[in-house]
Image: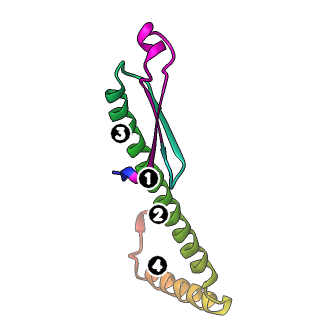
Amino acid sequence: MTRDRNIQEVFIRASGPGGQNVNKVSTAVRLVHIPTGIQVKCQQCRTQGQNRVLARELLSKAVKQMTADAKAMATACRERERRRQRIERARPKAIKEKILTNKKKQSARKIARRPVDVSRE
């Protein structure tokens, strides 16, 4: 949960239906998370206290989502760098050719070990 000193809280008049209560009382709540700059406005309920609780929940979810996105981005960058380095460490052409010739020899040996299929002839 975010700390209270990192949150700027402003009470404003809500809009929409509600009659005299909406026109006289500042029931809507706007919260700003100062370190990240995330803003949340809540005017779902008729009372300021309920809107304040809902706004804090929305703000904590938004901050958690932002940190999760940042972690995912960092992980993706690390993986991308790891794959790039793996490609750069590719084998030289001579070694690749040697490996391929050994594979071909082994394949020929395996084919030679197979039993002869009489039904094909």
> Residue 119, how many percent across, how many down?
42, 63
For the point 36% across and 53% down, the residue is 3
| Mark 1 or mark 3, earlier in chain | 1
Q: Secondary structure at mark 2?
A: helix
**Which is nearer the eye, 68 or 106?**
68
Dot 4: element: helix
Which residue is disc 1 drawn over?
6
> From the viewer's perspective, is residue 116 above or below residue 15?
below
Residue under label 3, please give it: 57
- Cα separation, mark 1 vs mark 2, equals 82 Å
Helix, strand or loop under label 3: helix
Q: Residue at x 35, y 39 (%)?
A: 57
Q: Tag 4: residue type?
A: Ile
Q: Which circle's residue, 4 or 2, is located before the other in the chain?
A: 4
Sequence-wise, which precedes: disc 3 or disc 2?
3
The mark that comes first in sequence, 1 or 4, is: 1
Q: Judging from the image, what secondary structure is the residue with disc 1 in?
A: helix
Q: Which residues are magenta?
A: 5-31
Q: Crowding near pointer 1: few (<14 within 10 Å), some, many (20+)? A: few
**Picture disc at residue 120:** 2
Task: Judge by depth and name the residue closer to the eye, 56 or 119.
Answer: 56
Q: Mark 3 packing: few (<14 Cα in 10 Å), some, or many (20+)?
A: some
Residue that label 4 marks:
111
Q: CA distance from mark 4 to mark 3?
A: 68 Å
